Amino acid sequence: MNWDQIKGNWTQAKGKVQQQWGKLTDDDLDIVEGKREELIGKIQEKYGIAKEEAEKQVDDFCKKG
């Protein structure tokens, strides 16, 4: 799955995103609204990790689809 597919089906993808990153709230996911950079920023903020690590996690998530 690529990011365009995730973005296009954000309502469905939100559940999978929340399973992967349980610290993200519904409000966080509403703010993200399918935007990759916003998701990376929220993951950085909630998990206290570097941007590169957050990007890697999002890329791995996309690959798992």
Image (cartoon, rainbow, N blue to C red):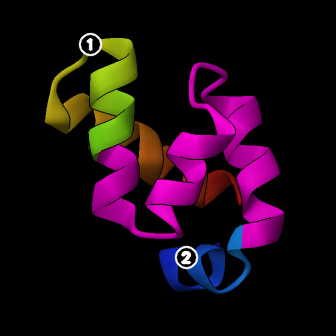
Residue at x 26% of width, y 12% of height: 48
Q: Quick one: label 2 or label 1, which is nearer the N terminus?
A: 2
Q: Is residue 40 left or right of residue 2?
A: left
The quadrant of the image that shows the N terminus is bottom right
Q: Nearer the viewer, mark 2 or mark 1?
A: 1
Is residue 50 highlighted in magenta?
A: no
At x 38%, y 32%, the residue is 43
Secondary structure beneath label 2: loop
Give the main secondary structure, helix, strand or loop, of the magenta stretch. Answer: helix
Q: CA distance from mark 2 to mark 1?
A: 25 Å
Question: Residue tagged by mark 2?
Answer: 2
Q: Quadrant of the C terminus?
A: bottom right
- Tell me: residue 2, above or below residue 27: below
Based on the displayed image, in which of its 4 quarters is residue 45 positioned? top left
Q: Which residues are magenta?
A: 11-40
Callout count: 2
Residue 17 position within the rendered picture, expressed as x and y whole percent measured from the top left: 67, 45
Residue labelled with disc 1: 48
Depicted 25 relative to depicted 2: above or below: above
- Please give the name of the residue rendered at 65% of the width and 87% of the height, measured from the top-left corner: 8
Label 1 neighbourhood size at 10 Å, few (<14), some (14-19), many (20+)?
few
* SS under mark 1: loop
Q: Position of residue 53 (x, y in %)?
A: 26, 30
Q: Amino acid at mark 1?
A: Gly
